[in-house]
Image (tube, rainbow, N blue to C red):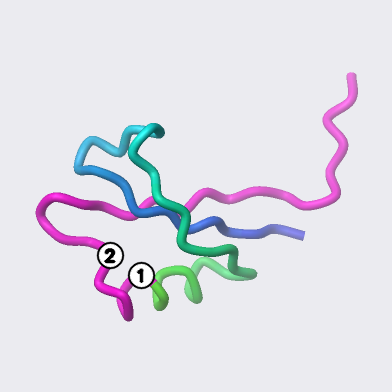
Amino acid sequence: MTLFILYQTDQWKTKSSRVFFGVFDSRVKAMDCAKYHKLSDNNTKIVIEEVTLNQCQCQ
């Protein structure tokens, strides 16, 4: 299962500036939330990170 994590960040998208806003089951829902809360402007950007649930990375 794929999940999408929504963050608001600075204009350079540094990891240290990320603010968590939610976990969604689709990219569209994450974008709708970001638009509704007006998370993106001239000084801030949004990052949607895609992660896979229940996946083993054993080697």
Q: Is residue 29 positioned above or below 47 on the image?
A: below
Residue 39: which numbered mark, if any? 2
Q: Is residue 38 magenta?
A: yes
The magenta span reads 34-59
**Which image quarter holds the C terminus?**
top right
Identify the residue at the far top of this view: 59
Q: Kindly indicate the quadrant of the structure image that contains residue 17.
A: top left
Q: Taking 26 as reference, is 54 left or right?
A: right
Residues under numbered marks 1 and 2 in contact, where contact means CB atoms less than 8 Å apart: yes
Report x, y in % for residue 42: 10, 54
**Which image quarter holds the N terminus?**
bottom right
Q: Is residue 30 magenta?
A: no
**Depth order, front residue of 20/52:** 20
Q: Earlier in the sequence, mark 1 or mark 2?
A: 1
Identified at 89% across, 25% down, the residue is 58
Disc 1 versus disc 2: distance between alpha carbons?
5 Å
Report x, y in % for residue 43: 13, 50
Residue 34: which numbered mark, if any? 1
Report x, y in % for residue 46: 33, 55
Amino acid bearing label 1: Ala
Q: Taking 14 as reference, is 4 left or right?
A: right
Q: Secondary structure at mark 2?
A: loop
Identified at 31% across, 47% down, the residue is 9
Q: Secondary structure at mark 1?
A: helix
Q: Is residue 56 positioned above or below 54 on the image?
A: above
Q: Taking 16 as reference, is 43 left or right?
A: left
Q: Is residue 23 positioned above or below 38 on the image?
A: above
Residue 45: which numbered mark, if any? none
Mark 1, other Cα within 10 Å: few <14 / some 14–19 / many ≥20 = many
Identified at 42% across, 53% down, the residue is 7
